[in-house]
Image (tube, rainbow, N blue to C red):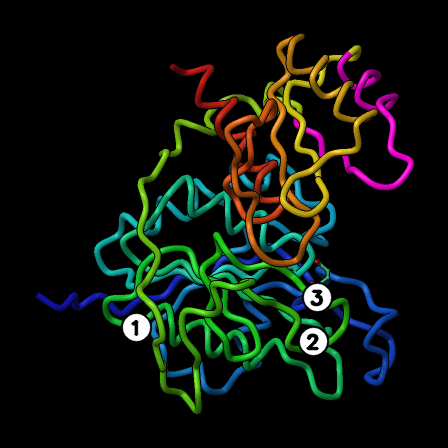
Amino acid sequence: MQSKAKQVVILGTGGTIAGTAAQAADTVGYRAAQLGIASLVEAIPGLLACPLETEQVAQVDSKDMGFSVWQALARRIAHHLAREEVAGIVVTHGTDTLEETGYLLQRLLAPAKPVVLTAAMRPASALQADGPQNLLDAVLVAREPGARGVLALLAGAVHSAAEVRKSHTYRLDAFCSGDAGPLAYVEAGQLRRLRDWPQGEALGLQAVAADVADWPWVEIVSSHSGADGRAVRALTRIGVQGLVVTATGNGTVHEDLEAALLEAQAAGVRVWRSTRCAEGRVLPRPDDMLPAAQAGTPYKARVELLLQLLSARGA
Ligand code: SIN
């Protein structure tokens, strides 16, 4: 039976979509996270007729995203998803760490309704701001019957939040899903779907119930020419609990760095290998001494390791 739910809840967290510059032509020297979510929505005539409500969960430049905003956001989304009249949720976010928040939310909630993250590359004050169209399209996806999972809507493309990554510093079309490609496109107010909506098992909110001050410490280190083990040994000495190494190619690590990572692993630090390649994943080999991360980027792998360490505490 098709759901009759129509309401969309728009949760604001800040970002360039809520940013302003002193000059309309300035698309670089602006301040993110200046305008409230209600005023962003009011500025879009196409949304006037939609049954929607807004809530300001945070107001941050997403480079400063932190565990307490993640925890609050996950809780508010779960609260609204449980309301029968709610068809879907839109979250406005900064582009810079949207891929981390999206990954976290999908793993925690794996929702049966759509949760659509959207953002903008230009501030709201720009001559041709991209935020209003993105927000309008995101609401369309949030109301799409049968849509599900945590999604990202940017520049007319709908991505799985678990796969999406920011791939350009400045262009409006700044996101991609690597070799998986987008799930759908929004074209002139119509959704054209290419792949199935994301499925998955939810870890549940209890995975992130701990006081954020007690969340595990997981860092990212990288393998490169001339790499050595000093940073890893220092991190291990001062209590890091997880390390993701941004490895070369199919997960190879400089031998001097690898020696330190193996010492860290022997000392009880969880160590995963991810890759600095823009596409593909690390394919495991039988002789691997450090496990390959399954999540697509080092940043997503770090979130996954964080969640696994948190879940292990509750086990
Ligand atoms: C941010 O990530 O909050 C600032 C940059 C952006 O949204 O494009």
Answer whether labels 3 and 1 touch (C-beta < 8 Å).
no
Is 264 left, or right, of 279 in this rendering?
Answer: right
Circle nearer the viewer, 3 or 1: 1
Q: Residue at x 48, y 26 (%)?
A: 308
Q: Quadrant of residue 164?
A: bottom right
Q: Is mark 3 within 8 Å of ligand 1?
A: yes
Q: Is 136 above or below relative to 32?
A: below
Gap between marks 1 and 2 measured at Cα:
26 Å
Query: What is the quadrant of the N terminus in the image?
Result: bottom left
Quick one: 298 or 153, which is closer to the camera? Answer: 298
- What residue did someone put label 3 on? 16
Q: Quadrant of ligand 1?
A: bottom right
Residue numbers of the magenta segment: 218-236
Quick one: 273 or 17, which is closer to the camera? Answer: 273
First in sequence: mark 1 or mark 2?
2
- What residue did someone put label 2 on? 124
Q: Quadrant of residue 253?
A: top right
Q: Which mark is residue 144?
A: 1
Is 31 left, or right, of 276 in this rendering?
Answer: right
Residue 222 in magenta stretch = yes
Circle nearer the viewer, 1 or 2: 1
- The percent coordinates of residue 120 (x first, y second) are 64, 71
- The percent coordinates of residue 174 (x first, y second) are 66, 71
Q: What secondary structure is found at the residue carrying circle 1?
A: loop
Q: Quadrant of residue 246?
A: top right
